[in-house]
Image (cartoon, helix red, strand yellow):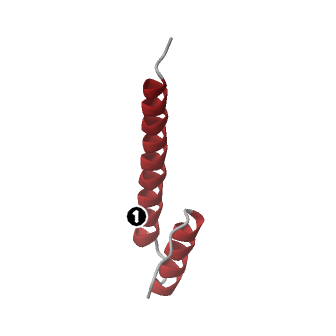
Amino acid sequence: MVALDEIADASRREADRAHRLRLEGLVEDIRKTIEGPSSAKKKVARIRELLAVQGYRAQE
């Protein structure tokens, strides 16, 4: 029988992995936005949108 601690540890590892993958995707999307041809104003708006989708807030 698998110990409850092992199940909890596996669950935490999976949650950490999923969070890391979301952050890596966010960083990649932000990098692409910064490198893109849009104006600075549009880039800032897009980055704020990307952050909001992930539950983050950008402050001025």
Q: Residue furthest top?
A: 1
* Residue drawn where x is 42% and y is 36% of the image: 13
Q: Quadrant of the C terminus?
A: bottom left
Q: Hey, what amino acid is under mark 1?
A: Arg
Local crowd size for mark 1, using a 10 Å CA cut-off: few (<14), some (14–19), many (≥20): few
Q: Is residue 38 something that shows in the picture?
A: no
Q: Residue 32: percent from the left, percent from the top?
A: 44, 63
Q: Is residue 27 something that shows in the picture?
A: yes
What kind of element bears circle 1?
helix
Judging by the rendered image, the residue that carries numbered circle 1 is 31
| Above or below, comparing residue 14 to residue 23 in the picture | above
Viewer-nearest residue: 32 or 55:
55
Q: Residue 27: percent from the left, percent from the top?
A: 41, 59
Viewer-nearest residue: 48 or 35:
48
Viewer-nearest residue: 37 or 10:
10
* Residue drawn where x is 51% and y is 11% of the image: 1
